[in-house]
Amino acid sequence: MTTANLWDKGGTLDPRVRAFTVGDDWLLDRALLPWDIAGSAAHARMLGRIGVLDASEVAALVAELRSMHEAARAGEFTVTEADEDGHTAIEARLTARLGALGRKVHLGRSRNDQVALALRLLARDAALDLSARLGMFAEAMFAFVDRHGDVALPGHTHLQAAMPSTFALWGQAWIEAALESMRALAHLHGELNRCPLGAAAGFGSPVPLDRGAVALALGFSAPQRSVVDVIHSRARLEGRLLHEIAVVGATLEKFACDLSLYLTREFGYLRMDPAFRTGSSIMPQKQNPDVVELLRARVARLRARHEEHTWVSAKLPSNYHRDQQLLKAPLLRGIDEAREALDMATLLPAHLFPQEPILLAAMTTDLDAAREASERALEGVPFRDAYRETAAAAPAPGQSRGVPPHVADDARSELSQSRGECTRLRAWTLETRLTLAARLEEALGPMPLP
Amino acid sequence: MTTANLWDKGGTLDPRVRAFTVGDDWLLDRALLPWDIAGSAAHARMLGRIGVLDASEVAALVAELRSMHEAARAGEFTVTEADEDGHTAIEARLTARLGALGRKVHLGRSRNDQVALALRLLARDAALDLSARLGMFAEAMFAFVDRHGDVALPGHTHLQAAMPSTFALWGQAWIEAALESMRALAHLHGELNRCPLGAAAGFGSPVPLDRGAVALALGFSAPQRSVVDVIHSRARLEGRLLHEIAVVGATLEKFACDLSLYLTREFGYLRMDPAFRTGSSIMPQKQNPDVVELLRARVARLRARHEEHTWVSAKLPSNYHRDQQLLKAPLLRGIDEAREALDMATLLPAHLFPQEPILLAAMTTDLDAAREASERALEGVPFRDAYRETAAAAPAPGQSRGVPPHVADDARSELSQSRGECTRLRAWTLETRLTLAARLEEALGPMPLP
Amino acid sequence: MTTANLWDKGGTLDPRVRAFTVGDDWLLDRALLPWDIAGSAAHARMLGRIGVLDASEVAALVAELRSMHEAARAGEFTVTEADEDGHTAIEARLTARLGALGRKVHLGRSRNDQVALALRLLARDAALDLSARLGMFAEAMFAFVDRHGDVALPGHTHLQAAMPSTFALWGQAWIEAALESMRALAHLHGELNRCPLGAAAGFGSPVPLDRGAVALALGFSAPQRSVVDVIHSRARLEGRLLHEIAVVGATLEKFACDLSLYLTREFGYLRMDPAFRTGSSIMPQKQNPDVVELLRARVARLRARHEEHTWVSAKLPSNYHRDQQLLKAPLLRGIDEAREALDMATLLPAHLFPQEPILLAAMTTDLDAAREASERALEGVPFRDAYRETAAAAPAPGQSRGVPPHVADDARSELSQSRGECTRLRAWTLETRLTLAARLEEALGPMPLP
Amino acid sequence: MTTANLWDKGGTLDPRVRAFTVGDDWLLDRALLPWDIAGSAAHARMLGRIGVLDASEVAALVAELRSMHEAARAGEFTVTEADEDGHTAIEARLTARLGALGRKVHLGRSRNDQVALALRLLARDAALDLSARLGMFAEAMFAFVDRHGDVALPGHTHLQAAMPSTFALWGQAWIEAALESMRALAHLHGELNRCPLGAAAGFGSPVPLDRGAVALALGFSAPQRSVVDVIHSRARLEGRLLHEIAVVGATLEKFACDLSLYLTREFGYLRMDPAFRTGSSIMPQKQNPDVVELLRARVARLRARHEEHTWVSAKLPSNYHRDQQLLKAPLLRGIDEAREALDMATLLPAHLFPQEPILLAAMTTDLDAAREASERALEGVPFRDAYRETAAAAPAPGQSRGVPPHVADDARSELSQSRGECTRLRAWTLETRLTLAARLEEALGPMPLP
């Protein structure tokens, strides 16, 4: 038997239409459930504040929502296919437990702004969580650089050996990219930190809600100004989050492409822990870096999540359309998959080992050609002439002189700046997340004394 | 406990790497299981044919595979997370039941070509299945045209009322698009109908297989010529299938856009069966065409499946890379979602009702302006002058003269041609599918007498 | 005759390969020329500062670069197909005019970081410029709301009339979206405001440059820390700019979708100035909103620019690859096309006229159902029961009571806050842009006295 | 001064709106001009056939169109910004030369179906042209295989050396992919080979045209059945062509990825003609395969063209919208860019040289492990046991035994089949193209005697 729809007016919905419209929404709503419940508690408290519910009603609703929240976290309360969605499941359970009181909680709000709120809370948390994981990836890379930073690495351009480099320069690049994304997520957190509740169907609530109070209770900086834009901004803000995830992905992808190359027999610059390698069903000798290839492929999937989200939201006139239901899957999956990819990338550096003899042999004198031309130029030959002279002179065979000291020194000092910024960003992320968690805990907590 | 990997050589794989590399592959492999088993039976028979297995070994393997096939269809045998993938699950069960004989079946093949084969069989079937469903969508539209084809409809360009049209002209457009996709799928079926088995890791098998025999046994027109291209062609052929699915989707999307518009209060050209409409949680009066919006949104998802597939397969050097594992999800989901979308689109026409009074009122005289200008021109006025005269003359207010008879006649005669083509294409699809099913049945059947 | 390549060492390049590799790069480089010249002047000054060039050499180079800059702006100096690219054109002209001195300017830098610098300067400016244009779009919408904000508009959900709204609520949504993008561009400006110069080929310069001095001279907040990441960050930062452009586009698209709908005969909510409408070649009566459809279609193109950029940069190992040349076209075109689309969207509001009689007739009593249910609920009936009672009661025919006063009041107060934020953001944008322009002017100006 | 619009009725269009709506359409229309003129000639002849124009009028129009066609091909007649588009330019010139007769030619048709026809003719030709170029790419690869096919190449999976291969097996893969695309283009040619003319604005022409006659005159197999679908099918058919171009691109991309790898110092499997290599502005020693990287990057662009086309056409209700104007750019550019990429890929094989000593050294005994395990298995050990035994045994160091004879033999015989198919497909393409060219020539030729 299916739970009665919130919009049930006595008619009968064709079961094939029901199945098609519900889709896997009930499954996806499971991830939203705790956020939806916390938001409902804040809404109920606010209805009390404006005098629509009395104190005992609020207390009863909040107590029931708190126990529902615990049940949801323990997996004892969930959304099933019989419920149309999580909002229905919550109201149905409130009504089952509290009778008429349960049927009061929806006053002044719509499923539209309820889902907007739950998703905003989830996305706000995800922005901070991904930032925290980026910080851990950066830390893993700092540790790699601490271990192997001084090892020489031929720097390539066009995949052709070009100039001397080191694993410190190489490692630094991934760290900077991570910090840039952490800053972007901090900006995005600021945008996500506005409360949508009160938009109702997108034209404001027919009830004079106190939007400021509910925003405050949920840790938001303010209510979102435009009620029409509550509906519109969902796709924009989620889209920016998914795009930033794709940008993070692009960094992991480049990292995976390097590993794939450096782990070949032909390059041989790195060796990977055998516990990280897999085999072939037909070739007994194979030890493959499947984990690296799948890291790259998962980034492909992250990009597709962003595109899926964009396709669903594009070319719709203003206000709510049911199409938006299909924004949930790419958002939720994209966030989860980004976590998995980041965690794997964080695990890898400790299991990679530069192969020094091979690397040393690869540091050949031709890598010094730019430096030689520059040295001639520093002695007064116009650079372009020095360039041609150097090109004409056969470079003496042998080993490169390595990275010039000032480049190495610069890298060291920059790494130490990056380390400082990483620490600051991680601290801010952690603190903000704790504050917000405490706020939600309070919203679900016992009523403050009058 | 996990099933021993086919490539197990005694080392230990880090469990986090195992989890990351397996992903949800085991879940997706469930859909491949029946195809993989049938392919394995054909492979075993061929090993018998070239003398590598003796007749009793083949008989035992085929019998066991047949029972596995039945178990798989009945849901009694499946792939679990403990298995790395479906190929491992099959070989493990054969070995558990038949001992040493089970460990013989993989001779001469690789998981690479095993998955290539299973996916080829699945995609070949999907091409025919989708074609069959397109045929049913076309039939539903023929029936709609039979019922309502003569009802007048203002034809729009730029969303502005333009010239007289009818629901016959409107319905015909969807039918032609469906037929075009059926022809494309028939072409694609021809491409998919080549047998990849025998490529092994992509460089041919070290065992002198009889590739022709196994191709024949599985109903393929021939073995695929190039063993390297067996690996490369997977992404191309699946990509073309997913693109054709997206093209079908674009037609359903346009259909949904029309419905969304015609079902508004402002247009009011169509009414939809109340059993197909859903409501709002806050606005008691609402009756929304959610099913139409979700049909449109699901097409967005179909496009994203194609893009996901392209992203995963792009920019890889030749031969196999583990990235290809992530091609499975968009392919399998894309096929399933296309079926659901097509079936819903097939259901809709019987529940749509042209609103004749509204439509009649919308057939205003200005829609006749092009005809008036043409009539003046047929009397000898240069068309461009007639155009300007007509534009200058205020059109007498009132009702349009309707669709000119020859346009209506043309539409009728074209529809009858389309009906014939639809019947032929449906028959071919059905017949081909039955033939192929019979062939697979045989491969899993008792050994033919010598 | 072609200009000698900077990398010319005496060999001969196949002309077909030359044509293929140069492509239309020379054409695109025209937009980069002024930025490249200004960057070259700052580089030359810095070479003086570190004692590599003497004061008179720097003065001669800067004077020549200044005149080149003027010539470039006046269209008297440009890049031609015979030059490989803009960098070659600049060095060739310096050499032609200044002899050996011209061949000295490239010391310590590579075309890689030269193009990185020119693009960074261009993108930094574009971020501010687009923000300024967004501010103008917001102003146009404020003016529309001032004129027509009180006119009632039926608010739709699912494209079905839902609740009372106004053109103030409608207009506010576009303004908020614009402000959000202005804030995003300000964040992005901060990221773009780091100086890439000094990375050379991506492994640092063989010459001990003063990276801080050149950054300062060009108005950057600091040099970019990691030299490897200078190369990597190009795709990320440009990608974020193009994505933000696509987000702006999504807002314009939604606006265009609304107009397309409201301008139909069937909706009729808006009328557009005849000077903005176009006609049909065959139907004399037609007056089409082509401008609105092309605005929507141009957004499609903006999204494709972002995707093109992502495709080119994806799945490349670390460091420079020539693929990056093809990042230029989508970036430069995307920026230009965004300007055109924004400017057209800014022009439109003054030419749109709400059709009050039609709108009034569309404000029917059923739009009050949610308010009625809420009023019953405020009197104590549980909301869900009130909802069902309201659904059952036939709404009295007639005209809606309109937007509740508190919603209207909220909108007014929020609009006034938005106006304040818009003013502040516009001022910051303008000021920052002026400061940066002055800095570049200085870099190209006469040498400061010692 | 601008050419009078075909839809001019005396009003004034805002010049900014005009600029925005015309865009670069006039530039793109230059490519359509010859097809549009030929289509106009066939239309004029058909107007004669149905008695709307008399024989002398038809003769005068066709003669003028023929001279216009010659002028267009010679670059003496073209579309300028002052013309709204090519259709306007043609009618304006006819009217300038022939007076009132010029104003008669548009009778019974619309710009909608005029552009549909011109694009159909262009796309039909492009499908054949691209097929012909694919044939040339295949021939270049056959020649490469003839020269170097027997050279051994370590076959990789997961980018790890796996099993013995040869350049014949490698080359064959690109050939098969080309043949598959040639077959796909032949199918697509069949779909493109239906005549859209007569749809007018998408609801049929108010004039009783002879659609069969005009189709026949232009070499089409038949008129396109549904007039509504004429408008809809444009995006579908062009989209399929652009997708097939992207599939061709994916093959060239994989080829470029292989070259990029094989040309590294670390792999060193191939050497490229110095005349195909380019240099660095700072590193005198560099010789880079830029051409290969740009080939890969251009494929990225081809994918983006397809996506741009899809974005523009998506989510539009039925019938014509001005958005479709923006379909032209990605179609025309995609076709041109595909030609350039194919031609470069065809040029490359003759300038690539396998480096035999390096390749021989890379053919190590571990590549024989699968064969060894299989040999044990052929002697009766279950394959999985043989696999483990082989894995445990340390492979004797030294050189691989090379590709097994039967794999080499199979490749040779398959290559010969491919050669046959390539010849047949090329012949069909050439013949079809000649026939169609002759038909158009006739349409523009002198009137046949009665």
Image (cartoon, coloured by chain):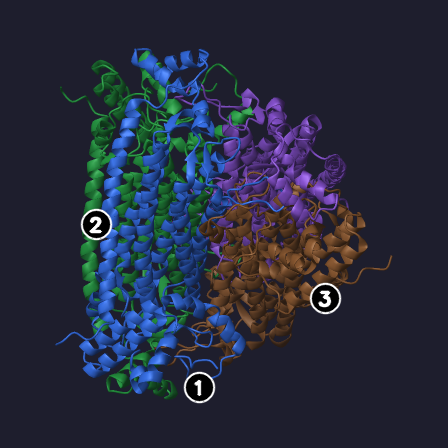
Chain colours: A purple, B green, C brown, D blue
In the image, which is nearer the foreground, mark 1 or mark 3?
1
Q: How many numbered callouts? A: 3
Q: Chain of mark 3?
A: C
Q: Secondary structure at mark 2?
A: helix
Q: Above or below — where is B26 with respect to C75?
A: above
Q: Is any atom of residue A48 visible in this view?
A: no
Q: Chain of mark 1?
A: D
Question: Disc 2 to disc 1, how far (Cα)?
Answer: 52 Å
Q: Considering the image in quadrants, where does the C terminus of chain D appear?
A: bottom left
Q: Amino acid at mark 3?
A: Thr
Residue at image position (55%, 77%) is: C351
Residue wearing tag 1: D10
Give a yes or no on whether discs 2 and 3 share a subunit: no
Residue wearing tag 3: C423
Q: Nearer the viewer, residue C85 or B29?
A: C85
Q: Secondary structure at mark 3?
A: helix
Residue at image position (27%, 31%) is: D412
Q: Amino acid at mark 1?
A: Gly
| Residue A209 position within the rendered picture, expressed as x and y whole percent measured from the top left | 66, 58
Residue wearing tag 2: B425
In the picture, measured across the screen, residue A147 lies left or right of residue D426, that is: right
